[in-house]
Amino acid sequence: MNSVKAWEILKNNGYKRTNKRERLLQMFEANDKYVTARQLLDVLTVEYPGMSYDTIYRNLSTFVALGILDETELSGERHFRMQCDATEHHHHFICMDCGNVKALEICPMDMLGPNLQDYQVENHKFEIYGKCPQCH
Amino acid sequence: MNSVKAWEILKNNGYKRTNKRERLLQMFEANDKYVTARQLLDVLTVEYPGMSYDTIYRNLSTFVALGILDETELSGERHFRMQCDATEHHHHFICMDCGNVKALEICPMDMLGPNLQDYQVENHKFEIYGKCPQCH
DNA sequence: TTCTAATCCATAATCGTTACGATTTATAAC
DNA sequence: GTTATAAATCGTAACGATTATGGATTAGAA
């Protein structure tokens, strides 16, 4: 995913091009890591004093709903990053220091076998946490 | 894990036997599902009017720290349940309706292979969400 | 029974998130 | 370009889950 594709999606869904959105998408495009709403606000407030949480959260929700961003919960806080382009379903290692991720080409659902015979599976989560080479 | 074992652990670590703790452990022993602090408070308040969140949260933290309870985050809220006795490391299917769990004897870390060569892995999470046979 | 640390209650503070009415802005029709 | 209007934003307040605090109570050992 990149900001060009993101804007296509936004436009197709009737969303307007605004400076704040542009800047948000830029930030996500610039570094491929999980960030919090606060981290985004802290940066955007410098350029746009008075920027409010409402704007951040509303846009993040929109982006997630449209499949532009991925979201995960790390130590009790929502974290966001640009969604992967990969066509293959996959999972991630997440660095708890810098937020950077590394894609893992495996999915544990492949080795489920006959477990959960009568269960209705709706979702699953597989993430590995630790420190990336740069951070330890 | 059961309340007898839990009390051994608590006593060994200098924690006192109180009615509230006894009742909390009973509740966890009675049904093997993930519950929230609020759900626990709602029940305990009937028997102990004036019961406060502080008591619930402090004890839950203690129990988790001592390995008596397991904790996971479901839809933005902390959920707790009695820790499994199984000696083998494993994961769970979690019913999003009733909170009941089913153990899965597999762990995706077994199929990691040479990925994450230079990474320091500290933790991982693998959970499957959906509806159990009773709930769908 | 007495003593003391552990525990508990009542309440307020904190943090992340969501919601609100008023105002501003991007887009499209004129 | 001007105007209309629906969307987006701002400023702020509300919210729910969690954590913290200070004083009162209680369990367990001496």
Image: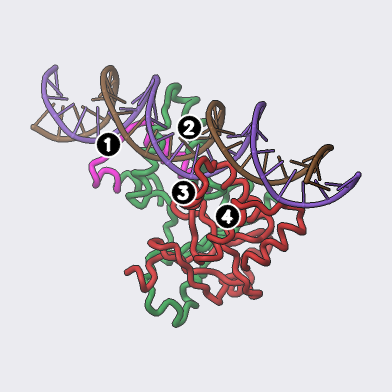
Chain colours: A red, B green, C purple, D brown
Pinpoint the chain carrying mark 3. A
Q: Amino acid at mark 3?
A: Val
Q: Main secondary structure of the magenta part?
A: helix
Q: Earlier in the sequence, mark 2 or mark 4?
A: 2
Q: Which quadrant does the C terminus of chain A fall into?
A: bottom left
**Which residue has dot 3 on it?**
A46
Q: SS for tag 2?
A: helix
Residue B13 is covered by the magenta coloring? yes
Q: SS for tag 3?
A: helix
Q: Amino acid at mark 2?
A: Leu
**Which residue has dot 2 on it?**
B41
Residue A18 at x, y percent in the picture: 65, 51
The one of B29 and D17 positioned closer to us in this rendering: D17
Residue B42 at x, y percent in the picture: 52, 30
Pinpoint the chain carrying mark 4. B
Measure the alpha-carbon separation of dots 3 and 4. 43 Å
Residue B48 is covered by the magenta coloring? no
Q: Quadrant of residue C22?
A: top right
State whether residue B112 appears in this view: yes
Closer to viewer: mark 1 or mark 3: 3
Mark 2 on the same chain as mark 4? yes
**What span is in magenta?**
B9-33
In the rendered structure, the answer to whether residue A9 lies left or right of residue B5 reads right
Residue B48 at x, y percent in the picture: 44, 24
**Which residue has dot 4 on it?**
B94
Measure the alpha-carbon separation of dots 2 and 3. 43 Å
Closer to viewer: mark 4 or mark 1: 4
The one of D2 and A133 positioned closer to us in this rendering: D2
Query: Mark 2 Cα within 10 Å, few/some/many (few <14, many 20+)?
Result: some
Query: Mark 1 Cα within 10 Å, few/some/many (few <14, many 20+)?
Result: few
Closer to viewer: mark 2 or mark 1: 2
Q: SS for tag 1?
A: loop
